Image (cartoon, helix red, strand yellow):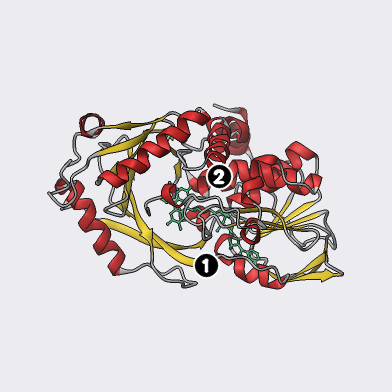
Amino acid sequence: MPLRLLKYALSREHPAPRFFRACEKPKDSYDVVIIGGGGHGLAAAYYLAKDHGITNVAVLERGYIGGGNTGRNTTIVRSNYLTPEGVNFYNASVKLFEDLSQDLNLNLFYSTRGHFTLAHTESAMRTMRWRAEVNKHVGVESYVVGPDEISKACPQLDISCSGQAPIHGALYHAPGSVARHDAVAWGYARGADQRGVEIYQNTEVTGIDVQGGKVRGVHTSRGYIATNKVLSAVAGFTPRVCKMVDVQTPIVIQPLQACVSEPMKPWLDTILVSGSLHVYVSQSSRGELVMGSSLDPYEVHSTRSSLDFVEGLTSHILDMFPFLSNIKIVRQWAGMADITPDFAPIMGKTPVDGFYLDAGWGTWGFKATPISGKSMAETIANDKAPELIHSFRLSRFEEYELTGEKGAASVGH
Ligand code: FAD
Ligand code: PYC
């Protein structure tokens, strides 16, 4: 029996175990304030402390950590993108994910499954060949496969999709994985806390103090905090926070919905995505089928999930797997996805000195959590963005140098 457990058992006091310190009251000032205790904000805090020795940092979260899109996503990690810049960036994240359980000393249930993007038309096959070529060029293992190889990997899949949309082939991406999303947030929170970062939940930033084009502090639901550096990592709340500093972005907020089935015996090893049927599915370590579809086709700042969604999704899942007709959906939810026109993120400096932006993660940001945290920490520490994220700068929109990733973003292409 571990000594710690024995000591706890023999002790007269049994305080509830805490994952990180309960910080009572924010200090008057910090070197860096991070708005948003999702994976991205917490990872940035962790790497600021670990890589750059910057520990006088507060993470302010209006709700609870991981309660935003981090705890709502379907946990797919992959790097089979369309642009060389995207593939390089997400590949760096996959590499960090592979060692992250050890790095954070927490089991993130990182599970490499292989990822199939199914093509139901010849034009979809052309996109797959294009992606395979770019991936190969960057050294990422993705290649086009035919229906036989798909059937071998997933014999339960009806290759004709009930005659609705016969599968022509797929892009197979060997490193495609899933991981526990909330564990990622909690692991980064604990690692940052252990290095001195303070985390405040139930603490909302209500305004940002900018004087002479420079950040001077933040107004919060718990008072004013002075700081010269603010990172906004608030995903679906980005337009509201950017308004506080008068920074314009082309982001629109659209809901993305997902659901899980009741648990089943393990039968689905791989991750399957169908662009034409607008659905994707994997099986979690608890046996649930984790399923989602495309973005809701309208802008709304809400996390309500709908009957329409679950009806549309399940009918297409049944086209692929008719044998699932008696399986129950047990939970459904939505997140507010911050969508950019080119389906690539916005990362780096902004026109306001000391205001850094990590946004535009839409439906694709969970997989980027480690590398975005590392890159944003470097940007804040040096006041200069690393080359790796140059293509994601905010100014690309006015320079008309877009980083077109629509053909590789989750299920919509
Ligand atoms: P969040 O986790 O949303 O964190 C932002 C935090 O900021 C929130 O907790 C919020 O409360 C807080 N906040 C906002 N305003 C304030 C304020 N004023 N003051 C203080 N705190 C504030 N990506 C993938 O890579 N793979 C997937 O399989 C995948 N599936 C998805 C499925 C769904 C249904 C959804 C909705 C998204 C999915 N994504 C996926 C996208 C991914 O979830 C997000 O891009 C990612 O989690 C964003 O992380 P974040 O830390 O930036 O944001
Ligand atoms: O980025 O792979 C992805 C994804 C799948 C579902 C939502 N996002």
Residue 181 place in picture, x, y as percent: 49, 47
Q: How many marks?
A: 2
**Callout 1: CB less than 8 Å from ligand 1:** no
* Quadrant position of residue 349: bottom right
- The mark closer to the camera, 1 or 2, is 1
Asked if residue 151 is positioned above or below residue 124 in the image, the reply reads above
Note whether residue 191 is visible.
no
The residue lying toward the viewer, choosing from 24 and 230, is 230
Task: Name the amino acid type tagged 1.
Answer: Val
Q: Which residue is mark 2?
A: 368
Where ligand 1 lies, by quadrant? bottom right
The residue lying toward the viewer, choosing from 135 and 156, is 135
Q: Which residue is mark 1?
A: 252
**Secondary structure type for disc 2:** helix
**Callout 2: CB less than 8 Å from ligand 1:** yes
**Secondary structure type for disc 1:** strand
* Quadrant position of residue 378: top right
Task: Name the amino acid type tagged 2.
Answer: Ala
Residue 74 place in picture, x, y as percent: 42, 49
Q: Residue at x 58, y 28 (%)?
A: 2
Residue 239 place in picture, x, y as percent: 61, 69
Residue 73 lies left or right of residue 361; in this view the side is left
Looking at the image, the residue that sits furthest to the front is 400
Specify few, some or many for label 2: CA neighbours under 10 Å numbering under 14, 14-19, or 20 or more: many
Residue 67 place in picture, x, y as percent: 53, 59
Q: Which disc, if any, is residue 381?
A: none
